[in-house]
Amino acid sequence: MDEQIQQMANRIEAKVRKYWFEHDEEEEEENLKINRLVYIACVLDPRRKLAYLSFMLDAMYGKSKGEALVKEVTADMTDMFE
């Protein structure tokens, strides 16, 4: 039974890594890979807005990369609504 659960957990982990992470060869680490539309949906949610997205991206990616992603999302939203 425990062996079956372990095999199932390994398959689930492989799928999560395939669809939600990307391997960065230069930094030799795995980075979270999320479609930017998920970020835009977060900004459009009245309970979250841009401040929440900024906070979460800083927590997930670090201050510099988080700020860069917020700028990209802001630019994408500006392009969509112009």
Image (cartoon, grey):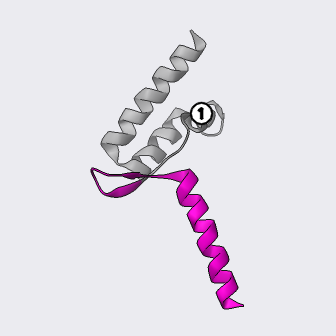
Majority secondary structure in the magenta region: helix
Q: Is residue 26 magenta?
A: yes
Report the quarter where the C terminus lies: top right
Residue 12 locus on image (x, y percent):
63, 67
66 and 20: which one is in front? Answer: 20
Rendered residue at 57%/52% (across/down) = 19
Residue 40 locus on image (x, y percent):
58, 31
User: 70 above or below 34?
Assistant: above
The residue under label 1 is 37
Provide the residue span drawn in magenta: 1-30
Residue 27 locus on image (x, y percent):
28, 53
Residue 21 locus on image (x, y percent):
49, 53
Q: Is residue 34 magenta?
A: no
How dense is the environment of label 1, judged by Cα within 10 Å: few (below 14), some, or many (20 and up)?
A: few
User: 72 above or below 13?
Assistant: above
Mark 1: secondary structure: helix
> Would you say 82 lies left or right of 2 here?
left
Rendered residue at 58%/16% (across/down) = 80
